[in-house]
Amino acid sequence: MINFSFKKKTILITGGTGTFGNAALRRFLKTDVVQIRIFSRD
């Protein structure tokens, strides 16, 4: 498994209202990211 560090990063999630985007958002909320941006057509 590859470990990535998102500490002090800004994250852009495309398709944030979908199943995968929602799961990614929940995962990133548990980390030390600076900002999370969500883009969705809905």
Image (cartoon, rainbow, N blue to C red):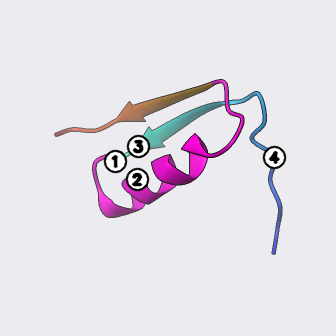
Q: Do the residues labelled 1 and 3 touch (CB within 8 Å)?
A: yes
Name the residue: 82% across, 67% down: 2
Q: Do the residues labelled 2 and 1 touch (CB within 8 Å)?
A: yes
Residue on which disc 2 sits = 21
Quadrant of the image occupied by residue 9: top right
Between the residue at mark 1 and the residue at mark 4, the CA separation in whole angstroms equals: 22 Å
- The residue closer to the viewer here, 9 or 41, is 9
Does dot 2 land on a helix, a strand or a loop?
helix
Q: Magenta region: which residues?
A: 15-34
Decide which of tag 3 and tag 2 comes sooner along the chain.
3
Decide which of tag 2 and tag 1 comes sooner along the chain.
1
**Which amino acid type is marked by label 1?**
Gly
Name the residue: 80% across, 53% down: 4
Between the residue at mark 2 and the residue at mark 4, the CA separation in whole angstroms equals: 19 Å
Decide which of tag 1 and tag 4 comes sooner along the chain.
4
Residue on which disc 3 sits = 14
> How crowded is the residue under tag 1: few (<14 C-alpha within 10 Å), some, or many (20+)?
some
Between the residue at mark 2 and the residue at mark 1, the CA separation in whole angstroms equals: 6 Å
Circle on res. 5: 4
Mark 2 vs mark 1: give the one in front.
2
Q: In the image, residue 27 lies at what x, y percent? A: 56, 53
Q: In this view, does 6 lie above or below 9?
A: below
Decide which of tag 3 and tag 4 comes sooner along the chain.
4
Does dot 4 land on a helix, a strand or a loop?
loop
Residue on which disc 1 sits = 15
**Which amino acid type is marked by label 2?**
Gly
Between the residue at mark 3 and the residue at mark 4, the CA separation in whole angstroms equals: 19 Å
- The residue closer to the viewer here, 32 or 36, is 32
Q: In the image, residue 41 lies at what x, y percent? A: 21, 38
Q: Is residue 11 above or below residue 16?
A: above
